[in-house]
Amino acid sequence: MAFYNNSIHTHEIDPIYYHVNSRAEFKLPTNTTLLPNMRLGNIGVTASDDVANYNVFCGTDALIQSIALYDGNQLLDQCLAANMWACFKNYNRDNNVNASKYRSLNGSGRGLKVQGMFVSAATTYPLMQQFLAQPTVNTTESTTKVGFLTIQQLLPFLDKSLYVPTTVYKNLRLVIQFETDQAIVLTHSNKNPQTVRPILICDELIGDVTKSLGVYKGVEWDAIEHDMVVLPAITTIGTGAILTTSDQSISFNPHGFKNKTLKRLLMVNSPTSAIVYAVPGTPTQNRHGGKLVSRTQYKQQVQFVVNGRALIAGNGITGANERLGYLHDTFGKCSSWPGCNQIGARGVHFVNYLESTACQDYIGVNINEYIGDLQI
């Protein structure tokens, strides 16, 4: 299918290869000029019943495990932790923008409002809830909620391009790997989700407008790369209701950024145990955000040592507001709420049991150095 105006021809492209719950591959139009605002549509799943919702903090974006753009067999750009990055970018927006726009595009629960006050004999605090309830995942493709994703937020090559000439990039392919972990995709982990066939939407420049573009001079962009380390669990001391923990001091040397210029760094505390991301007493139901959120660590202190020099003065980043401040200084405004990066905070309560605390504790720092050695 195609739509036209005087200078733009919009293509809706079916995948040349598609395998349920595995991957999809698209081939882009050749010998023409494309705009970089490529979009994925019809992103979604069906489920065994209509009880589950998509990941509350990420929506249908959680389905994209990785995404890559190739010219033939030459990799141009990729995002290997696409859904984790997309989950953060949903947080890295104004609350009003999430409520009025992105909640409808990706079916997430982002965008909150205060609905009166919760009053009891012991305490009083604001009641918060989503602007509108999340649509449920249904059993058939014709009725299940599907989403829409702007690929530029995952592939900086497209974000920094003014246009993409397929006379230069003669065999462009977009390859998507789907997420299969139900603790990431849905609010329940026993619903047997099956992906819906997605479509790629791209705009082609036509007519005389292409003559004004001049000679293509290439593009410069900052790639999104990631590395991962595993922090061992802290040993608890004691039994019953009285438990204490021992201090744990560990240093890591991630090698994914070595011999590269690292600009901004985002640190995500991704949970690995179902004890952390499952609802207590209901192991098949996931806390909102599932494995994609950044969970607060108890009395966490973080220091970054870049090429032998401590990046942060003193003991590094030590407090919840300090972490939030560094994050906002590095990545800009985020739709935070009271207690979202604190353990045991009771300053806010969510209607419908929306998990409100210790779930959005990201750390962001500006490094802007060539990395010979990095310690965290």
Image: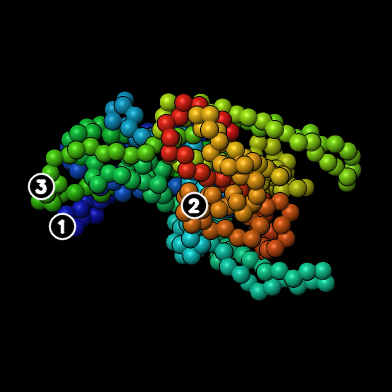
Q: Find the distance from the CA under tag 3 to the CA under tag 2.
A: 41 Å
Question: Which residue occupies the foreground of this view, 122 or 308?
Answer: 308
Q: Is residue 47 visible?
A: no
Q: Which residue is mark 1?
A: 6
The Cα atoms of the two marked residues, 2 and 1, are separated by 43 Å
The mark that comes first in sequence, 2 or 1, is 1
Q: Which residue is mark 3?
A: 211
Q: Tell which of 366 and 14 is nearer to you.
A: 366
Identify the residue shown where x is 70% and y is 33%.
Answer: 249
Residue at 64% over, 60% down = 338
Say which residue appears at 48% left-offset and 60% top-offset: 94
Compared to 186, does 229 lie above or below? above
Pinpoint residue 312: horizontal percent, then vertical percent.
56, 41
| Number of the label disc, if any, that sits on residue 329 | 2
Label 3 crowd (10 A; few <14 / some 14-19 / many >=20)? few
User: Of helix, strand and loop, which one carries label 1?
Assistant: loop
Q: Amino acid at mark 2?
A: Asp
Q: Is there a contact, CB below 8 Å, between mark 3 and mark 2?
A: no
Instruction: Of the two numbered discs 1 and 3 on the same chain, state the one appearing first in sequence.
Output: 1
How far from the left and from the top, in percent, is residue 32? 18, 41
375 sits to left or right of 171 = right
Mark 2 neighbour density, 10 Å: few (under 14) some (14–19) many (20 or more): few
